[in-house]
Image (spheres, rainbow, N blue to C red):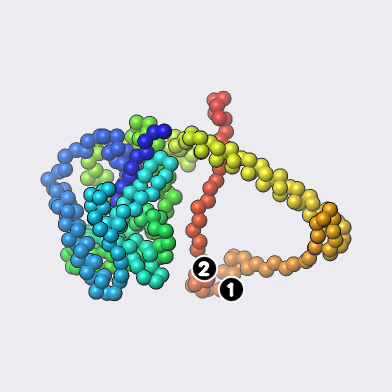
Amino acid sequence: MATKVTFSASRVGSCTRVLSAGLLGYAPTPTPPEQLRYIQAAKDSSRWESLVKEDLRDLGYKFDIGGYCPACGRDGIHVQLEYPLFTLIGHLDGQMTGEGWGGPLEIKALNSNGWSKYLSKGLDGFPEYRDQYTAYWAARKDPRKGLYAVKSKNTSELDIKEMTAPPGNIDAIIERLTYTAAMVRAGKLALGEESDKCWFCRFKYLCAKDDSNTTADTSRVPKLDSTEMVKAASMWREAANLESRAERLHNEARDTFLSAGLSRFEVDSLDISIETRTRISYPIEELRKWVPEDALGKAKRVREYREVRAIERKAQNGNS
C-alpha cells in the first residue's frame, strides 16, 4: 500500500495546488522583501498567545495547554486524524475544561487590516483559520463547547467567541484533502483555487486554477481500490438489494393482513394486531403564514450528520 501523505491542520484551508506542490517537492520562490514583515509577525505569535491566555484566565476561563510534543518538536496538545489516503496532524493552543466545555481553544493575533476583516467577516474571511478549527473540533471526543479568541495587535482589543459547533464543514475538508492526496499519490499537481492570498503566493509559477463550471468533474474524484473498500462497495450493493426486496415483501404482507378485516388474529405463530392511529404534522409552509419567523427560529433544532450516498457510474467507452 502506498504511503499516506500528512497534512498540517493549520494548512487545511490552503489552496489544493499549493498543498500538492509542497508535498511533491516543488520549491517556492524567494520571499519578496516587502513580505518579510509577515514572517516576523508569525514568529511573534507565541508571545501574543501567552498574553491572550493570561487575559482568558483573568476572565475566569479554564483550559489545559498540554506541553512539549516530542513527536512534532513544538508546544501544544497533539491531535491526529487518520483517513484512507492521508493523516491530519495539529496542535491545539489549549482544550477548554469544566462542565459543558471540552472543545478546542484557538488563539490568533491580527494586525489592523486583519482585525477589521475579522470583525466584518468572522472566520469566513479566513478559510485557513476556519478549517483549522473545524479539524480540531473533529479531533475532540466530546467537544460540546470550545473557545476562539482573537486579539488586535494594534489596540489590544480581544474578541472571544464561545463555539458550540464547528465553523466549517469537515466533510468538505476531507473531500479536498482526499483529492489532493490522490493527486500527489499519482505524482500530479492538484488544480488550484481562487483565494485572496493569490497575490503573494510563492507557487504562482505553477498556478493552474479549476475554473470549470461543470457540476460533474469526475477527474477530481479519487478512485480507491483497497480490499476493504471494494468489499464495502459490494456490501453496499447487497444491502440496497435487500432493502428493496424487504420493502416490497413487507407491503405485500401488510395488504394481505388488512384484507382479513380483523383487528387481531394469529397466523403461523405470528400475533397480528391492526390499529388505527393518527399522525399529526405541521407543514413549515403553513406555519410561516401564522407564526413569526423569529419565533420559528427559537424552536429550530439543527442536527449535523454525515450522509453517505453511492451511485452506480454509467459505463463509459465499454468500461465501468
Q: x, y percentage for residue 210?
A: 37, 39
Residue where numbered disc 1 is placed: 290
Residue 157 position in % (x across, y down) = 22, 69
Q: Name the side, left or right, on which 111 lies relative to 252.
A: left
Q: Report if residue 58 is visible in the image.
A: yes
Q: Is residue 286 above or below residue 230?
A: below
Q: Residue visible at 82% across and 55% down? A: 269
Q: Give left or right: position of 144 versus 254.
A: left
Q: Percent from the top left, x then y, of residue 319?
A: 55, 27
The amino acid marked with disc number 2 is: Lys
Choose the circle earlier in sequence order: 1 or 2: 1
Mark 1: amino acid: Trp
Q: Residues within 10 Å of mark 1 (few under 14, many from 20)?
A: few
Q: Which residue is mark 2?
A: 300
At numbered mark 2, what does the secondary structure look like: helix, strand or loop?
loop
Residue visible at 53% across and 36% down?
230
The single residue placed furthest to the top in the displayed view is: 318
